[in-house]
């Protein structure tokens, strides 16, 4: 089976309290559809958790406006550790999560009115689009950006949907492009600029010169969930002036405080595994056959980008469509390029939490 990328399935976010922060995400981003909620051990992740099996609870939540979801992840066997130093623009790893909005100005006014911590005001990207940064109560930074594709217009006043990509700190843009452009398909350069940027001025370390490259995928995503997950963009940030850049997860575990992974929903895991190995990004974790996550199941794997940021791939085999009726979908024998019917994807909205 050839490799098919449906889109960003979710951004993994390590938090100290899943339920408390999810309330905030529901209020400010409208990410209110629960796909699964599960407490279990994480035996396959010991490579990144100090060699020991740790327990966790995780909730996967989506917005019916479209975009990727949040996998909100909390250790239950240990405390969730914060970074040991202030994370600055240019540090290596998943620095900012991009959130889609069909009306950035309306999203800005909604968040301002409701007391969200906005970093600076409405600013312009190098391509002239309005955007702004907002910080959650755990100090994670989100970039609200314009994305006109909407899966379903909801009544959410904030006009935002889910994950529309990420801003990632890298040490060498050309090396990183081998993963993000060549394998993940973000081969179109929307802009490539080096400067001290006004729109970064309210971010920690945003007063230093950086090179920023915004990448998009020229090919429309295919696969079962592609209409719901929608398009996404990756912005790579390379420090120009700073010489003290560090890995955001230096001396910490996967699952600790912050953006722990960027996860893609894919089909054709074996072909992807070969492509990644050939390009120098071998799987560091591979669940092999179907990994059961209670209400969902599939095969998952991880690679690291050249600076150690975790990219996850999930080949979904079973997914709940309408849990109240016990309706689950088996995807194993479907055409990998074909999207699920829109009515079926919309039925997932029945799992909404108010």
Image (cartoon, grey):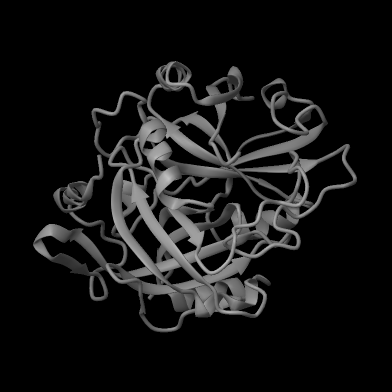
- 61 vs 337: above or below: above
Question: Where residue 308 sits: x, y (%)?
Answer: 70, 62
Left or right: residue 206 versus residue 116 is right
Residue depicted at 19% across the width and 67% down the height: 329
Please state which of residues 189 and 80 is positioned toward the viewer in this rendering: 80
Please tell me in which quadrant of the rendered image residue 324 appears: bottom left
Please state which of residues 303 and 154 is positioned toward the viewer in this rendering: 154
Question: Where residue 340 sits: x, y (%)?
Answer: 22, 57
Please indicate, yes or no, whether residue 70 appears anywhere in the rendered image: no
Assign the C terminus to one quadrant of the image. Answer: top left
Q: In the current view of this chain or complex, which residue is farthest to the left?
A: 325
Q: In the current view of this chain or complex, which residue is farthest to the bottom?
A: 289
- 194 vs 14: above or below: above
Please tell me in which quadrant of the rendered image residue 48 appears: bottom right
- 282 vs 198: above or below: below
Assign the N terminus to one quadrant of the image. Answer: bottom left
Residue depicted at 25% across the width and 44% down the height: 353
Left or right: residue 23 versus residue 180 is left
Residue depicted at 60% across the width and 78% down the height: 46
Question: Where residue 288 sits: x, y (%)?
Answer: 45, 83
Question: Where residue 300 sits: x, y (%)?
Answer: 45, 72
Please state which of residues 122 and 192 is positioned toward the viewer in this rendering: 122
Please tell me in which quadrant of the rendered image residue 222 appears: bottom left
What is the tally of numbered marks visible in this picture?
A: 0
- 103 vs 251: above or below: above
Please indicate, yes or no, whether residue 103 appears anywhere in the rendered image: yes
Residue depicted at 78% across the width and 52% down the height: 172
């Amino acid at each position: 089976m050839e490799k098919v990328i449906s889109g960003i399935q979710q951004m993994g976010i390590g938090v100290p309290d899943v339920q408390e922060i999810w309330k905030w995400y529901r209020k400010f981003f409208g990410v209110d559809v629960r796909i699964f909620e599960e407490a279990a051990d994480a035996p396959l992740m010991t490579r990144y958790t100090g060699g020991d099996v740790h327990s966790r609870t995780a909730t996967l939540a989506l917005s019916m406006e479209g975009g990727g979801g949040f996998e909100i992840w909390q250790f239950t066997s240990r405390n969730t550790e914060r970074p040991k130093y202030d994370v600055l623009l240019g540090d290596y790893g998943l620095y900012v999560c991009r959130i889609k909005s069909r009306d950035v100005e309306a999203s800005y006014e909604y968040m301002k009115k409701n007391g969200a911590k906005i970093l600076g005001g409405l600013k312009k990207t190098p391509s002239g689009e309005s955007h702004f940064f907002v910080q959650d109560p755990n100090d994670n930074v989100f970039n609200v950006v314009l994305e006109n594709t909407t899966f379903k217009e909801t009544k959410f006043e904030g006009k935002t949907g889910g994950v529309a990509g990420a801003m990632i700190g890298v040490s060498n843009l050309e090396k990183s492009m081998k993963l993000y452009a060549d394998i993940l398909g973000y081969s179109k350069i929307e802009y490539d600029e080096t400067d001290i940027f006004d729109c970064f001025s309210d971010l920690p370390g945003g007063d230093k010169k950086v090179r920023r490259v915004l990448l998009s995928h020229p090919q429309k995503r295919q696969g079962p969930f592609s209409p719901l997950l929608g398009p996404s963009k990756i912005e790579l940030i390379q420090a120009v002036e700073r010489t003290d850049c560090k890995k955001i997860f230096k001396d910490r575990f996967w699952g600790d405080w912050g953006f722990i992974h960027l996860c893609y929903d894919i089909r054709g895991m074996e072909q992807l595994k070969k492509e990644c190995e050939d390009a120098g990004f071998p799987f560091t974790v591979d669940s092999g056959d179907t990994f059961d996550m209670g209400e969902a199941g599939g095969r998952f794997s991880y690679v690291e980008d050249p600076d150690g940021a975790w990219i996850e791939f999930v080949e979904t085999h079973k997914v709940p469509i309408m849990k109240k009726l016990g309706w689950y979908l088996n995807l194993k024998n479907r055409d990998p390029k074909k999207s699920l019917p829109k009515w079926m994807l919309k039925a997932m909205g029945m799992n909404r939490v108010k």
